[in-house]
Structures are given as C-alpha cells and as structure tokens.
Amino acid sequence: MTDTNNNPREELTNAGLKVVAFSGDARSNFLEALDLAKKGKFEEADQYVAMANENLELASLAQKDFLENEAEGSRQGLDFLAIHAQDHYMTTLLLRDLIHNLIDIYKK
C-alpha cells in the first residue's frame, strides 16, 4: 500500500487516513445491516455485513501499513491521526461484534 513517490510522512498520513475511511465505511455498513435486520430483511442485512467485513479487512491492511511506517521512524511521537485512526478501527471492531449479536437476536 505504500507509494514510493511519497515521502515517509505522506505515506504514514495516507495509511492513517485509509484506516479512518475504511473503518467508517464498515461502521456505516454494519449500522445499515442492523436496520435491515430490524425490518426482517436478513439476506440484505447479511450482504451489508459482508461489505462491512471487506471494509474492515481493508482497514486492517491500512493499519498494518500505518504501523510499519511508524516502526520505520516515519514520525516522532503520537499524533492526532494515530489516535483517531486507532479509535475508528477499534470501535468498529466492537460494533461488529455487537451487530452480529443483535442480528442473531432479530433472527430469533
């Protein structure tokens, strides 16, 4: 995912922004899946869960790039983007688990 045309700081920033974007997309997909499950549209809900999981995989890959760039010394200290990206990613992982359980409840 790194771009050799960018400087290390830009690569780090781009990776962090991707974590935020893909996590945000996954979050939206999970919430849409829950709304569909509430209406009894479980096949559609499952499609949104699948899209959310794909976005989480992309977020995970971006997070890997982000952490690799940080480990290579692309920045000094912890900045807002690092905290924001990690927050988005981790809360979406938590939301994933919650949505799965709620959809299971609606199916019953």
Image (cartoon, grey):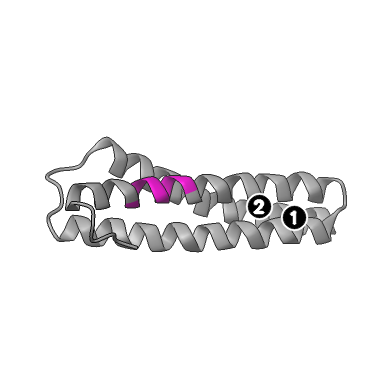
> Which amino acid does the dot numbered 2 rest on?
Ile
Q: Main secondary structure of the magenta part?
A: helix
Please state if 54 lies on the left or on the right of 10 as rendered.
right
Q: Position of residue 87 (x, y in %)?
A: 40, 43
- Is 19 contained in the magenta span? yes
Where residue 45 sits, quadrant-wise, is bottom right
Residue 99's disc number? 2
Residue at (28% x, 36% y) in the render: 80
Q: Is residue 9 above or below residue 108?
A: above
**Helix, strand, or loop for circle 1?**
helix
Q: Is residue 99 above or below residue 4?
A: above
Residue 103's disc number? 1
Residue at (24% x, 62% y) in the render: 68
Of 90 and 58, which appears nearest the observer? 58
Q: Position of residue 17 (x, y in %)?
A: 38, 45
Q: Which residues are magenta?
A: 15-21
